[in-house]
Amino acid sequence: MDVAEVSFEQVLGAAKTISGVAHRTPVMTCSAIDGIAGRRLFFKCEIFQKVGAFKFRGAFNAVSQLSDEAAANGVVTHSSGNHAQALALAAKMRGVPAYIVMPSTAPTVKKAAVEGYGAEVIVCEPTLAARESTASEVQARTGATFIHPYDNDDVIAGQGTAMLELFEQAAELGTKLDAVIAPVGGGGLLAGTSIAARGLDSSIRVFAGEPVGADDAARSFQAGELIPQTGPKTIADGLLTSLGQRNWSIIRQHVEQIVTVRDDEIVSAMRLLWERAKLLVEPSSAVALAAVLSSKFDPERRAGSVGVILSGGNVDLERLPWMSNS
Amino acid sequence: MDVAEVSFEQVLGAAKTISGVAHRTPVMTCSAIDGIAGRRLFFKCEIFQKVGAFKFRGAFNAVSQLSDEAAANGVVTHSSGNHAQALALAAKMRGVPAYIVMPSTAPTVKKAAVEGYGAEVIVCEPTLAARESTASEVQARTGATFIHPYDNDDVIAGQGTAMLELFEQAAELGTKLDAVIAPVGGGGLLAGTSIAARGLDSSIRVFAGEPVGADDAARSFQAGELIPQTGPKTIADGLLTSLGQRNWSIIRQHVEQIVTVRDDEIVSAMRLLWERAKLLVEPSSAVALAAVLSSKFDPERRAGSVGVILSGGNVDLERLPWMSNS
C-alpha cells in the first residue's frame, strides 16, 4: 500500500475544527440490552448528530480544509444518503454551493433533507459507475471540489472524532473501554475510529459489524487484499458501497475482526434499540449491535465494556422493517 | 380545597431519594424544530428514564416512603401502562411484591413489560370503576399498599424532580427557562412540575398540553371546579384518566394555561420528534410539543426559551399512527 495513513494528530485536529459546530453526542446505556449482551455497552449516539448521522463530522472537517478560492466553486459528491446531507449542510455553513449526485433509489426522506439544506440534487442511475461519471460531469462544469464520502483523509479524520468523545464519555461514567465496534460500509467511520482508538490507548480492541449481503470488508480481510463489493443486498442501505482504498489500508492494520450479520439479526438489533433503549437508529446503525450480540463476537468474552457507535437515525418512517407488509 | 399542598421541600427530598437510582435524563435541543416553533425548546427526555417514562420517579419515591412492615405486604395499583411498569420495577428494587390491575385494552408491549419486572398482572374491564374495585379486592386479599398513579403526594413530589433537573440542565446550556410545559392526564407530572418550577423561580410560566378528546383539565380550568373526564377518546393513551383531586388543587394555583390539541396535531408533533430530533416519543409525550406549536400557546410570544417535558417513549412499534393502515 502506498497510501499514507491518516495520523492521530489529524483526528485531534479535526476535533478542534468541529468543536462547537458538531454536537458532542450523548453516550447512552441500557441495562436491558446489557443483560442480553452479557456485557456493558456504551452507545455513542450519532443519531443525534447534525443531519442525524456521524457523516457531518467528516464532511465539515473536509469543507473546512478547502482554501477560500477552492471553496467558492463549491463541493460535489455522490452519496446514497447521509454524507449527502452532511456535505450539503457543511457547504451551507461555509456559504458555498453543494452539488449532490444521488441514486434514483435513495429514500425520499434523504433526498428531501438534502434539498432542505439548499443543495442542488442531481439524480442518476443506482450504479457506482453512473454516480462517478455524473459527479465528474458536475465537477467539470462547476469547478467544484469532489469530497468523497469515505476515501478521503479529512473525512476519515473527522469521523474519528466520535471515538475521541466516546472514550472520554465512558471514562466520565467510570469505565475504560475494552473494545469499540462500528459498522463498516466504505470504511470512513471504521478507519477514523481505529486511528482514534489506537492513538488513545493501544490496548483497545477494534471490531466492525458488516452485513452478510455486503461483506466485502470481511472477504478482503480473509483474502488479505481489497475485494470490491458487487451486487450488495442488505437492509442496511448505508453500507452498500465498497471499502475505499485509504480505508482498507487503515482497517487491515488496526481492526481485529469483521463480524458479519444477517439482515434478520440487523432487524432484531434495530428493534431492540427502538423498544428497549428508545434509540431511533437506522438499520446500518443496528449492524454494530447485531455484531456484538452475535456468537462470533469475542467468544472468549474478554471484552466486558464495549463502545458501540450508533452511526445514524435517518429512517424512512413510512416503512419499518419488522412490519409484515413493508 | 382542604387538600394540603405538596411542598417544594418534598420535591427536593424526592430528588435525594431517587438520586443515583433514577436516570438524570438528558436535555436535547433540535434546531430544525426550534425553527418551526420560533422559540428555543429544551426537551427533557424522560423517554430515556427507567421503564421509558417519568413515572419511575414518583413510583420509586412512593415505595421508598413505606415502612418496612408496610412494604413487606407489597404494593398495588391500577394503571393503563407506564405507572404500572414503574411501580413494578420500584417494588422489585425494594424486594417486595407488586400487584398491577390493568385494563384489558392496555397495549401488549406494556403488559409484557410489567410481567418482565416480576409483577403480578390482574386484568379487568377498561373502566375506572372496574379498575378501582379490582384494586380494592387485591388490597383486601394481600394487605398491599395502594399507590395511586397520580393522586398521591409522594408520587407528585417524585414527578417534580424532572423539572429540577431540566432547570439545571438548561442553565448548563446557558439558558434561563421562560416557561415549561408538560402533558396533563391525571396531573401527577404537571402538579409536580409546577411545584418545582414555583420553588425554583416564581417567574417561570407553567403550561400544560392536553388532548381535545380528554380535556377535563381545560374544562375544569374554565369552570373553576374539578370536572371528571367521561368517555375520553384520543390517541394519547397515557392521558385518558381524570385529573386527581390533589393534582387539581395544585394545578389550579400554578398553571397559567391548558392548551388543548387535536389528535392530528399530536401525530404531527410526534412525527416531527421522530423524524427531526430522532426522539422516539409516545403520543402522550408529543402532546406537549403539539401545544407549543399551537397558535393558542403564548400568542404574544414572550416565552423565548421553553422547557418541554417528553414524558415517555413506550410505543407499540407494530402500529405507527401516521401509517394509513394502522
Image (cartoon, coloured by chain):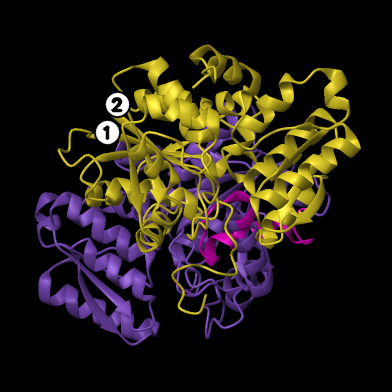
Chain colours: A purple, B yellow
Q: Is residue A223 above or below residue B191?
A: below
Do residues under tags 1 and 2 come within 8 Å of each other at their CB atoms? Answer: yes
Magenta range is A275-298
| Three-letter code for the amino acid on which mark 1 is drawn | Ser
Front one among B285 and B43: B285
The answer for which chain carries disc 2 is B
Q: Could you say where residue A271 lies in the image, as x and y percent from the top left?
A: 62, 62
Q: Could you say where residue B206 lies in the image, as x and y percent from the top left?
A: 35, 30
Q: Which residue is mark 2?
A: B175
Mark toward the viewer: 1 or 2: 1
Q: Secondary structure at mark 2?
A: loop
Q: Secondary structure at mark 1?
A: strand
Q: Is residue B281 left or right of residue A295?
A: left
Q: Residue placed at 60% from the left, 62% from the top?
A: B316
**Of label 1 and label 2, which has the lower sequence position?**
2
Question: Distance from label 1 to label 2 (Cα)?
Answer: 7 Å
Give neighbour class at mark 2: few <14, some 14-19, many 20+ (Cα, 10 Å).
some
Q: Which residue is mark 1?
A: B305
Give neighbour class at mark 1: few <14, some 14-19, many 20+ (Cα, 10 Å).
some
| Corner quadrant of residue A142 | bottom left
